[in-house]
Amino acid sequence: MRKTVTVVFCDLVGSTALGERTDPEVLREVMTRYHAELRAILERHGGTVEKFVGDAAMAIFGLPHVHEDDALRAVRAAVEMRDAVAPLGLEVRIGVNTGEVVAGTGETLATGDAVNVAARLEQAAEAGEVLIGSATERLVRDAVRTEAVEPLPLKGKSEPVPASRVLELLDDVPAYTHLIDAPFVGREAEIERLERALASAVDARSPQLVTIAGPPGIGKSRLARELLGRAEAHVVVGRCLSYGEGITYWPLSEIVSQIGDVEAALDGSIDAGLAATRIGAGLGSVESTASPEEIAWACRKLFEALAATRPLIVVFDDIHWAEPTLLDLIEYVAAFAQDVPLFVLCTARPDLFEQRPTWTAPKPNATLLTLGPLADSDSESLVTRLGDVPAATRERIVEVAEGNPLFVEQLVAMQAESGNGELDVPPTLQALLAARIDRLTKPERAVVECGSVEGRQFHRGSVAALLPELEREKVGAHLLTLVRKELIRPDRSTLPGDDGFRFGHILIRDAAYEAIPKRQRAALHERYADWLVSRLGHGAPDEIIGYHLEQAYRYGAELGEADPAVGRRAAERLSAAAQGRGRTSLPR
């Protein structure tokens, strides 16, 4: 499989001199601790250690599973490794690079130029220095302060390679506390629903649970911010993290840090001391233990105390990352809190409903608000308000973004940065979509990959034909699952007697397609052409058949395995289409 990953190389500086001046027994102990420390840090951040060679380590972020923040995880791990070996009296130099590789199993997990460049960056780094490639820098620039270095003439590269030196990791900005640049457009009906739910919580002193759901970038956080900006209430926010140790109650920890003195906030309650102790036990700040149920009870008491004097909005951000224990806590608080103006606001991706299907069950005091794409007119307004973009480029951005506000923002920013009129897909979006595809089960991923071969629009029959025979039986169930996950949606079929589907976004289709190895792409394109001919006979469109055969031939040629017979078939079909002798579109 082809994947975009981030590669880390770390090497010990002065290892020869260290061996010369250190007793072998002591050296062995030091190196054992060194290797253990590096492995623990890399794995804690989600990296896979490919190998230790002497005093050097190589790790991959993105294997076995891609994450949208792999580059940032890798840089955080690199900085932590650099700092962690200092107490051992050691220094390291580190190279980090992001790029496409072919993933495998066995001794070599990843193969590609991205691996070679990461190794060369490490060799070019000074003691105690972390050098990162340009692709990595683009992915982490909002969270890491860097300094560009002179392009490096790396061994084996025809041109000097751009690189940056990591200076520091920037502190995480608490959710919803920093200004947001994107203007608020559209969503009038959605903001009205939120305001009505909030008014119900305040006026009737009836706690409400509201979940804003939708795919990444659709505007969940922006809508929540708009509500918070209009509300007259005390607001506390906790974020759910995608990885880390001890993250079950991380959102609660952030909320407590915003409240300050928990016992003082509970003042007047007969259970103040007990509730404060149980919350402290959950956060590990006191020498005590408490069950999840007792911690949930204490949180309810805290929120009720805060809401007793002023309406309280408790925001839990990204609850699709939440541990089941925290989801239980949220549901318990919303169900059991009484006679207070309490509004619990959650944001989530559709992934939440896979792990917690009951979240969508109707409840008297719960609202589920699912966001769809912005209208084209709203997207165009957003582009206009974000920057001075030429009309032709503005239309293209609206077309490519397909109503996703984050895509609009990123595409406008990328256009402003490049200034060349080209509409390149930002690496942040590529990482986001690749991670969504990679989180699918293996059968689901096979279905979207086969669908992507046909194109943005595809058919159940073509997917079944491209899958191995043993996997065809469940293709319908997998397609329905993918619809629920909002990666695809039902669409008009252009083939009689078949079901049609459409990728939720053209960039999702591209992410699925680009994950397919070229050899497999060649085989799938040829099989699709053969299937369409068998399906439609003489009515098969020459242009479409020719296109897929041409793709099969081109990918084979890129791998040095061009099939002349496939090339001739492609030429014949394309020639017939050009001369108007055959069909050029699918029957409707």
Image (tube, rainbow, N blue to C red):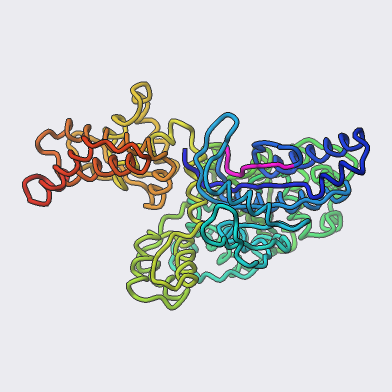
Give the residue furthest to the left: 581
- Whether 263 is among the magenta residues is no
Give the residue furthest to the top: 470
Q: Could you tell me which residue is drawn at 32 percent across and 48 percent down?
A: 456
Residue 54, quarter of the rendered image: top right
Q: Is residue 172 left or right of residue 576?
A: right
Q: Could you tell me which residue is drawn at 27 percent across and 34 percent down?
A: 462
Can residue 246 be seen at all in this image of the molecule? no
Can residue 514 be seen at all in this image of the molecule? yes
Q: Quadrant of the C terminus?
A: top left
Taking depth in this image into account, of 28 and 486 the one nearest to the observer is 28
Q: Is residue 161 left or right of residue 330?
A: left
Q: Is residue 553 above or below residue 185?
A: above
Q: Kindly report the secondary structure that dominates the magenta region of the rendered protein.
A: strand
Q: Could you tell me which residue is drawn at 64 percent across and 37 percent down?
A: 50
Q: Residue 359 in the image: state x and y as whole percent.
A: 55, 41
Q: Is residue 532 above or below residue 148?
A: above
Q: Residue 519 in the image: state x and y as whole percent.
A: 37, 36
Q: Residue 333 in the image: state x and y as whole percent.
A: 68, 46
Q: Could you tell me which residue is drawn at 72 percent across and 60 percent down?
A: 169
Give the residue furthest to the bottom: 388
Q: Is residue 29 above or below residue 308?
A: above
Taking depth in this image into account, of 330 and 522 the one nearest to the observer is 522
Residue 461, quarter of the rendered image: top left
Count of numbered circles on the image? 0
Part of the protein shown in magenta? 56-63
Q: Residue 301 in the image: state x and y as whole percent.
A: 77, 49
Taking depth in this image into account, of 346 and 524 the one nearest to the observer is 524
Q: Is residue 281 left or right of residue 470?
A: right
Taking depth in this image into account, of 306 and 507 the one nearest to the observer is 507
